[in-house]
């Protein structure tokens, strides 16, 4: 998967057995963020998976997180299951309920003897266990990354995490997935498993530990044009993409009202992909900080895969 998130299938089993399936989903990840797709962010564990598997170069994904999740878990285009709208066809499609004829993957795997586990962000209609999962940790705190407050285990609400003992949610999600697989190995080793690990990272808001951010800040002080060109050069060397790099659409901003964000974030924020050399020093520093935080979020995610 690419554009807004990355999903990788890892099949681990004897050739004659039903494969175990692990789906790793990163939320709003650009596919060129990963080292195996030309990115400068260190992602050695995901790169190792790619080196022993397949890197796709022809694929489709929606540009938003929640239509992508539904498409991934049902096998249908998001528009088919009312999770995204098509102007002039189903303009209210993004608000509709998923049809009954589109069950989620774990419900279809259960008759084949699979046990299914969910860890992380949900953002799909319905509850996890009735949808076919045997165990679930659902994080509903989509607006911050430290010390979850609104989270559920097996569809039962958990108490908030003590801020005095903070947790970074990327690690919380990975730890639950590991716990489920450890339990599976001890008590259900005769059954195949499907594990859906749905990280929130690197979806906004941009949040990461300060020491992780500091490791990346220097690399982005030269601006996004140089980073973009460096990624493209690597992608061509990797034979991932061909042709020429597309022009930046300088007049295309975010598809939502931005004045409030500008007011909230201050003079360092901008609402268009302007040339780096036209920015003020304050804007350059703020944008470099944002790119460094994003990189830190991706690097931490990769470390949890490892």
Image (cartoon, rainbow, N blue to C red):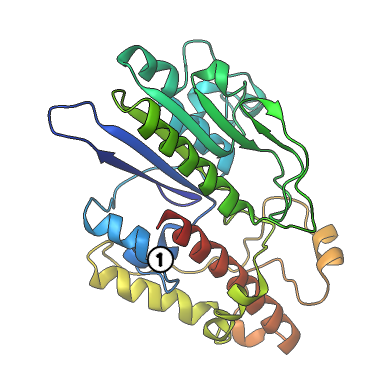
Picture quarter containing residue 85? top right
Camera-side residue: 1 or 18? 18
User: Of all residues shown, which one is farthest toward the front?
Assistant: 186
Q: Position of residue 295 (x, y in %)?
A: 54, 69
**Above or below, 26 relative to 95:** below
Is residue 76 visible to us here?
no
Quarter of the figure with the C terminus: bottom left
Front position in the image: 255 or 159: 159
Please provide percent x and percent y for residue 97: 62, 18
State left or right for residue 220 relative to residue 208. Answer: left
Q: Is residue 13 found left or right of 114 in the rendered image?
A: left
**Left or right relative to 108: residue 132:** right
Quadrant of res 159: top right
Q: Residue at x 56, y 43 (%)?
A: 65
Q: How many marks?
A: 1
The residue at which mark 1 appears reads as 43
List x then y, in percent, for residue 142: 70, 46
Q: Residue at x 62, y 76 (%)?
A: 211
Q: Residue furthest left?
A: 16
Tell me residue 255's x, y (percent).
Answer: 67, 51
- Could you classify mark 1 by the number of other residues whose Cα lies within 10 Å: few (under 14), some (14-19), or many (20 or more)? many
Please report the residue visible at 78 percent of the width from the left and 43 percent of the height from the top: 160
- 125 relative to 122, above or below: above
The secondary element bearing badge 1 is classed as loop
Q: Residue at x 36, y 61 (%)?
A: 45
* Along the line of sight, the residue nearer the viewer: 162 or 285: 162
**In this rendering, is residue 211 above or below 297?**
below
The answer to whether residue 215 of the structure is visible from this angle is yes
């Amino acid at each position: 998967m690419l554009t807004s998130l990355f999903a990788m299938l890892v099949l681990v089993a004897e050739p004659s057995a039903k494969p175990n399936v692990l789906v790793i989903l990163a939320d709003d990840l650009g596919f060129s963020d990963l080292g195996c797709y030309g990115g400068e962010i260190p992602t050695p564990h995901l790169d190792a998976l790619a080196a022993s598997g397949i890197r796709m170069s022809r694929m489709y994904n929606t540009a938003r997180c929640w239509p992508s999740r539904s498409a991934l878990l049902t096998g249908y285009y998001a528009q088919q299951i009312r999770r995204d709208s098509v102007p002039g066809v189903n303009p209210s499609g993004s608000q509709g309920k998923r049809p009954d004829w589109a069950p989620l993957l774990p419900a279809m795997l259960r008759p084949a003897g699979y046990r299914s586990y969910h860890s992380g962000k949900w953002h799909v209609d319905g509850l996890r266990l009735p949808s076919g999962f045997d165990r679930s940790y659902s994080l509903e705190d989509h607006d911050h990354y430290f010390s979850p407050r609104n989270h559920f285990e097996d569809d039962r609400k958990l108490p908030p995490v003590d801020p005095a003992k903070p947790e970074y949610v990327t690690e919380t999600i990975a730890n639950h997935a590991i716990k489920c697989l450890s339990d599976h190995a001890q008590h259900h080793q005769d059954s195949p498993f499907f594990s859906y690990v749905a990280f929130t990272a690197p979806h906004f808001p941009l949040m990461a530990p300060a020491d992780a951010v500091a490791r990346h800040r220097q690399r982005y002080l030269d601006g996004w044009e140089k980073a973009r060109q460096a990624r493209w050069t690597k992608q061509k060397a990797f034979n991932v993409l061909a042709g020429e790099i597309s022009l930046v659409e300088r007049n295309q901003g975010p598809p939502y009202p931005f004045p409030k964000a500008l007011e909230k974030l201050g003079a360092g924020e901008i609402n268009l992909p302007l040339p780096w050399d036209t920015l003020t020093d304050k804007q350059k520093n703020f944008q470099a900080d944002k790119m460094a935080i994003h990189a830190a979020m991706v690097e931490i995610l990769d470390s949890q895969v490892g």
